[in-house]
Amino acid sequence: MYVVCKEHVELAIENFVDEFEDAPDIVDLKETEFSDWDPPVKCVECERHAEFLVV
């Protein structure tokens, strides 16, 4: 699972495919709310605001 900004979505997809050998789902964090989990606020690759969950 990767929480990333828009700039790092492609990198997160590549990393996911390399690790799991499967295509990920991409969730827009602006449009989705989680009842039991608060996603990280910052991208795992940089300090920008996280916008997508690659899972």
Image: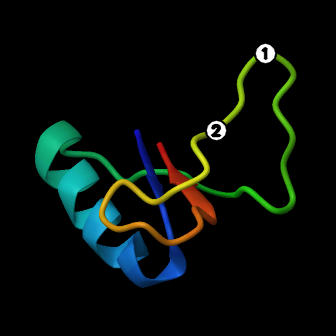
Amino acid type at mark 1: Asp
In the drawing, does residue 34 fall left or right of residue 44? Answer: right
Residue at x 64%, y 38% (from the top left corner): 39
Amino acid type at mark 2: Pro
Residue at x 52%, y 79% (from the top left corner): 6
Q: Residue furthest front?
A: 47
Q: Nearer the viewer, residue 24 or 9?
A: 9
Query: Is the residue marked by circle 2 packed among few (<14), some (14-19), or many (20+) residues within 10 Å?
Result: some
Q: Residue furthest left?
A: 18
In the drawing, does residue 16 fall left or right of residue 51? Answer: left
Look at the numbered disc 2 and give the secondary structure of its residue.
loop
Q: Which residue is mark 2?
A: 39
Q: Which residue is mark 1?
A: 36
What is the x, y in percent for residue 22? 29, 46
The circle drawn on residue 3 is: none
What is the x, y in percent for residue 23? 36, 54
Q: Are marks 1 and 2 in contact (CB under 8 Å)?
A: no
In the drawing, does residue 8 fall left or right of residue 34? Answer: left
Residue at x 33%, y 63% (from the top left corner): 13
- The count of marks equals 2
Q: Nearer the viewer, residue 22 or 50?
A: 50
Q: Disc 1 to disc 2, how far (Cα)?
A: 10 Å
Q: Is residue 47 above or below residue 53?
A: below
Here the colouring is rainbow
In the drawing, does residue 12 fall left or right of residue 21? Answer: right
Q: Residue furthest top?
A: 36
Look at the numbered disc 1 and give the secondary structure of its residue.
loop
What is the x, y in percent for residue 38? 71, 31
Query: Is the residue marked by circle 1 packed among few (<14), some (14-19), or many (20+) residues within 10 Å?
Result: few
For the N terminus, the image quarter is top left
Residue at x 61%, y 50% (from the top left corner): 41
